[in-house]
Image (cartoon, grey):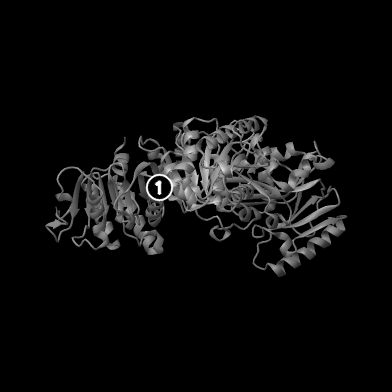
Amino acid sequence: MTALAAALLNPRRIALVGASADATRLTARAQVYLRKHGFDGDLFPVNPRAETVLGEKSYATIADIPGPVDLAYLLLGTEHVEGVIADVAAKGIPLAAILADGFAEAGDEGRARQERLLATARAAGVRILGPNSMGLINLNARTACSVNAALEAESLPAGRLALVSQSGSMLGAIMARGAARGLGFSHLISTGNEADLSASEIAGLLVDDPQTDAILLFLEAIRRADLLAEAARRAHAAGKPIIAFKLGRSAFGAELANSHTGALAGSDAAADAFFRANGIARVTMIEALLEAPALFIGRRPLPTPKRAVSVMTTTGGGGAMAVDALGVAGIETRAPDPVAVEGLKAAGLPHHGRMIDVTLAGTRADKVQSALAALAADPHTDLALSVIGSSAQFRPHDAVAGILGAAKAGLAKPIAAFLVPQADLSLRMLGEAGIPAFRTPESCADVIRAFLDWQAPRALPAAAAVAHALPARPDEADARHLFGALGLATPFAVMATPDAVPDGLAYPVALKILSPDLAHKTEVGGVVLNIADAAALKRAAAEMLARVRAKAPGATITGFLAQPMAKGLAEAILGFRRDPESGPVVLVGAGGVMAELHRDTALRCAPVGLDEAHAMIAEVKGLKPLAGWRGLPKGDLDALARAIVAVSRLAAVAEVAEAEINPLIVHADGQGVTVADAWVVRG
């Protein structure tokens, strides 16, 4: 174990800098909680105005503490933190956790304060947890080094789940919710502002922790995606699932760029792609974050999930709720196959329709166990779900006995339970047995969906270098030259002025204004189609120039672009974006001016290979006709896939922040694709 891992995950000698002798104050809580919950290591309160703090010897300065210190928790006001970091460094303390706020989250002044703090710490080799961190907790070692009020609880169940949270308050909320269900944690760590240590790096440390079986992340943003990707790959190799809950799913939380791609590939869509690419399961409900580990621990991603489950129930209404929620999540409740039917018959259980209703036998453990065994033998489903009605509340031992027995029998696939009433004891019994158990149909569906979406980290395709110089402010012609360097060249000509009509154009042509400032040229009258000859082209260019100058007087005009008209079977949008959190992504969707309205897209981390590109195409509803749907002519999907791969290579071109082809015209099978419009943004 590294010095950092030891200091963060299991500190034994802790300095509480700024600890208060008044037990009612926030700055006294860490000491109160550490001793209350049984910490048997050494505590060193640092308070120059007191000889003792809450019954323990106090020290005037950090330097006065005898011997080495693993962790300094700075409980000081914002204005005092900077000056103490030098003392932490001089003492040789490897890690300082900082409670105070008022740093990067507080505007320019706070950001400058955080940068100075970090520079001092880095120069001295001190790692920082926070600022704005509620501390760290190791329940197996009874180390409650935090000020979170959830530690007022009389007892805290230890376990083998680790939580890393960017929200300090959610640290306690999740711990309390888990404790109510008998779920224990090994570690809970609040990362705050993540000026230095990120949730991503801490996840990597937890991969190597022998007391941790699964890592839960409560994220407001992805920071250090490279470290999280590395941690996820090592976690997969170690058989430790990483399960994430991330805020920002709504459009209100996304900072959108100027192109269609920016709007379609917002940060949350990019986060989804990042999690999928790196083998991280994502849940969308906070309840699901607690309920998911039991389904994931000890299992690997299914290589070819059927996206189907078997459901047995003791309550028709409760079972129907589960079936409905699963269906909304894209998971079919499937009627038992002949093998399962025979098993159900042998147990004397009904088996009509999609849902197995065992109401009359629902509390008989042998019947439930037999039914689950029969359903688990069905080769066409991924999981067997037992829905339990009122017996879960009023006869908990009887209600769960059959499920416990089935789990002990080691069935061929996972089993899980949804408890319709408020049934805390049943939930606790199932949780302690490691059986996935759900309080609501929505969280049940969310967890099962996350499990079936879960993939092994993808193989990283090589991103070959792209030798191409991009001007500081590129226009469409520059974008086309870049795409040409990627293998997506399409004939076009540039006109410097309306009079400079080039020879040899293949009419009819499309004419577009060239400007680095105009991503959406149609909105300012910068596109004219089906121009028949040179004279008409000259007139159209002059009229276009007047229109654009009137509607966009501040735009720089660099000329005009003329290209032969092209018609295919369909239009696609093909885009690239370097997401500020998740890194480079590539997008394909149904294209044209309606692309942003329909939002029918597929997104992946870039670069991608051909197989992944074909999988992306298959996800887009608007492109399905190109596969020959209902006898329609087939489009050149191979050429489209190659185009996706080509654009994804922009991941290797660091100066490209965003790029787009919209539309990309897809021709008949074997006839390729045509770039109809292009755009690129430098970073």
Provide residue 214's location: percent of width, then percent of height: 43, 40
Provide residue 100's location: percent of width, then percent of height: 31, 59
Q: Going by the image, does 311 lie left or right of 405?
A: right
Q: Residues within 10 Å of mark 1 (few under 14, many from 20)?
A: many
Question: What element does badge 1 sit on?
Answer: strand
Whether residue 263 is visible to the viewer of this picture, yes or no, is yes
Q: Is residue 527 above or below residue 636?
A: below
Q: Going by the image, does 532 lie left or right of 488?
A: right
- Considering every residue shown, the one lying at the far bottom of the view is 550
Identity of the amino acid at label 1? Val
Q: Nearer the viewer, residue 502 or 67?
A: 67
Q: Quadrant of the N terminus?
A: top left
Q: Nearer the viewer, residue 338 or 563?
A: 338
Whether residue 605 is visible to the viewer of this picture, yes or no, is no
Q: Going by the image, does 588 lie left or right of 114?
A: right
Provide residue 119's location: percent of width, then percent of height: 33, 51
Q: Nearer the viewer, residue 446 or 129?
A: 446
Q: Which residue is mark 1?
A: 164
Provide residue 436's location: percent of width, then percent of height: 49, 42
- Considering every residue shown, the one lying at the far left of the view is 51
Q: Nearer the viewer, residue 275 or 466?
A: 275
| Residue at 72% in and 42% down | 489
Number of callouts in the render? Answer: 1
Q: Going by the image, does 327 lie left or right of 532?
A: left
